[in-house]
Amino acid sequence: MAREHAFLHTSGDDTIAYNRYEGTGPGVVFLHGLNSDRGGTKAMALEDHCRERGLAFVRFDMFGHGQSSGRFPDGGITRWTADTLAILDQVTQGPQILIGSSMGGWVMLRAALERRERIAGLMGIAAAPDFTEDLMWASFTADQRAAMSRQGYIDLPSDYADGPYRISHHLIEDGRKNLLLRAAIPLTCPIRLVHGQRDASVPWSTAQKIADSVAADDVEILYIKDGDHRLSRPQDLARLCETLDTLIARVSVP
């Protein structure tokens, strides 16, 4: 199975860094979380798992992340969805399973809505649709909202990075254009959702909200009682790989 590390050129001088392994279908595409990248623990574990099974696999850095072009504060769900669609259209072939981690779970759902004919299944890992509105904006103090309006951003402390996350007003406003959990989500492919019940970043009840919103009947949620937001312990990674296997067994591939 050949391996490719390359850059996909999109609009202007923008590039998307990606790794691709050739293999059989359905292919698997991994979507990382906010301020993460394609080299994270979950992405690498799932890539190894797919390689062992001869499955095609792609992981990539979204705009403003990792080795891709752009500045993180200039990104948003619209742009990151466009990156995912570019990868689907130009790097992959045939039916694909999207795996979205945290913010990547939101992008996963948005991209699936745009390419329903290409999506064989979805797997969310602590998927976080609507987080900019429900988890960020809703929790901001009056002073934080005023600072956001005044300077166009605020810096938030993070448990997942050495420094704070710079959250731009653009990210909040763009998130409002992409909200999903306020209405039915017309996706009918098999869906698996994995969420730790000790997740301090994204409430585990979000998985149930996704399940209630999608049109699909083949939806399963795996709650990991002692799991946190990262779900990167060896036992968590094993569960993710097992969940992917069960999803692959259920998808319908022409």
Image (cartoon, rainbow, N blue to C red):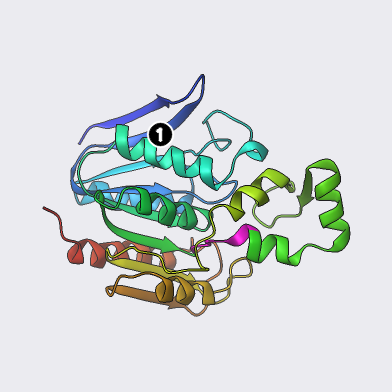
Say which of 73 and 6 sits in front: 73
Is residue 129 found inside the magenta-colored segment of the image? yes
Q: Which residue is mark 1?
A: 18
Q: Which segment is the magenta one?
A: 127-132
Q: Amino acid at mark 1?
A: Tyr
Q: Is residue 243 left or right of residue 167?
A: left
Q: Is residue 5 left or right of residue 127?
A: left
Main secondary structure type of the part rendered in magenta: loop
Residue 144 x %, y %: 84, 56
Q: Residue at x 65, y 61 (%)?
A: 133
Choose top left, top right, bottom left or bottom right for residue 141: bottom right
- Crowd around label 1: few <14 · some 14–19 · many ≥20 (10 Å): many
Placement of 56 over or under 160, stated as above or below: above
Place residue 157 in its image quadrant.
bottom right
Magenta stretch encompasses residue 54? no
Is label 1 in a helix, a strand or a loop?
A: strand
Query: Seen in the image, is 18 located left or right of residue 138?
Result: left
Number of numbered discs visible in the structure rendering? 1
Residue 211, above or below 90: below
Q: Nearer the viewer, residue 87 or 222?
A: 87
Q: Which of the pair 5/105 is nearer the observer?
A: 105
Residue 139 screen position, x and y as percent: 74, 66
Q: Residue at x 45, y 62 (%)?
A: 125
Residue 168 in view here? no
- Using the rendered view, name the quadrant where residue 8 is placed: top left
The x, y position of residue 111, in whole percent, is 40, 49
